Every structure is written in C-alpha cells, then in structure tokens.
Image (spheres, rainbow, N blue to C red):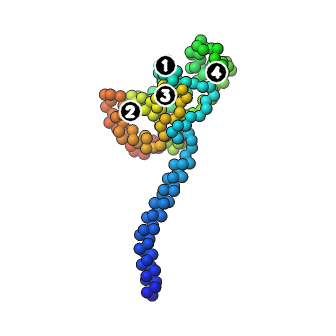
Amino acid sequence: MRFKWEVSRNFLQYSKFILPVGLVAVLATVLGVGWYTQPDRFVRGYEPVQPIPYSHALHPGTLRIPCQYCHSGAAGSRYAGIPAVEKCMNCHSVTRTDSPEIRKLAALYESGEPLQWERIHSLPDHAYFDHRPHVNAGILCQTCHGEVQTMDVVYQNMSMRMSNCLGCHRDPEYALQAGSTIVKGPEHCYACHR
C-alpha cells in the first residue's frame, strides 16, 4: 500500500512540471511548423518572375505616374487590380515602340490576349482585405507595399501576417496623413475574417 501511495505522490509532483512543459512543447511545434511551412507568396521578399519586365522605379518613380492610374480599382473596389494591356498601350502605342518587350506587349494587344502577370501581394483565403477604406482614409500605398516607386522589380515588402495588420489597426498614426481624424481601425475578428 505504501509503495502505491509513493508512486502516485511522485507522479503528482512530476506532472505539475511535465504537463506544462509538454503543452508548451506541443504549442511551439504547431506554431513553428505553421510559420516555416507558409507558402512563399505570403513571405516578405517574395518576388515572382513577371512575363514582361516592368520598372516601378521608372513609371511611378521617375515619370511620377500615380499608383491609381494603373491600379484604378483601389479607391472604388475591394481589389486594386492589375492593369490590362490596353492601359499599357495608352502610352506604349507611341512610346518606346521599338523595345522588344513593348513589341511583345503590342502583339498581345493586337491578339486580344491578356497579359498574365504573376500576383505579388496576396493574403490567405481566410483573410478579407478591402482597398477602399484604406485608400479613402488616405493611407499611402507605400505603407503596405513599400517604396514601390524605387523598385525596379516589385517584391512583397511586408509580411502578410496578421500581426502587421493588427499593429496598424491599433496604432495607425504612422500610416495616416497629417490631419486625419482616424484614431484606430477595427480589431474585431469579422473585420478581416469573413
């Protein structure tokens, strides 16, 4: 009888230590696997090869073409949108027409085929994002997309993790233009998970 009592007493002493350590180890493993196995498209620095090289350093940088000229959906739609070949041809039907890349673009335009750009910025399917409230609040594109006007090749500047979005929603001052009356963004789950 005494042996059983000591075994159960020893078990209780060790379980107070082993149980929490075991739970922490399981939680760390789950989080670690989730972190390291996320798809590349959600990772900071993601830079897919595009079908035609396009320099943002030239277009919005040097030439100062506003972001919303090409990404016209940003102020009035959930998606900013990728410009159609027709938008590119507004300028390139008369500008740099001898460039091999512009010739490829012109051939696509004449055939009526779309240009299949590789998407750079995307969120997981369980996250909801709408450009409209952000753009209409005066938040600059560079807040999330980085200094695009200096990038020859655009890459994902910000990790698409929830902590980045919540950080801005909780303290948006650095993202807003001077004089904005916005104090915070919504933090409830439904704001981003629908």
Asked whether the beta carbons under mark 1 and mark 3 sit within 8 Å of each other, the answer is: no
Q: Front-most of 74 and 61?
A: 61
What residue is shown with label 4? 101
State the separation of the CA atoms marked 1 and 2: 23 Å
Mark 4, Cα crowd under 10 Å, few <14 / some 14-19 / many 20+, is some
Residue occupying the point 54% across, 26% down: 152
Name the front one of labels 2 and 4.
4
Task: Indicate the position of residue 146 as horizontal and vertical percent values.
Answer: 46, 32
Task: Say which amino acid is labelled 4.
Answer: Glu
Residue occupying the point 48% across, 56% down: 28
Task: Say which amino acid is labelled 1.
Answer: Thr
What residue is shown with label 3? 148
Q: Quadrant of residue 191?
A: top left
What residue is shown with label 1? 62
What residue is shown with label 2? 175
Q: Front-most of 78 and 69?
A: 69
**Sequence-wise first label, 4 or 3:** 4
**Sequence-wise first label, 1 or 2:** 1
Task: Say which amino acid is labelled 3.
Answer: Val
Residue occupying the point 63% across, 17% down: 99
Mark 2, Cα crowd under 10 Å, few <14 / some 14-19 / many 20+, is some
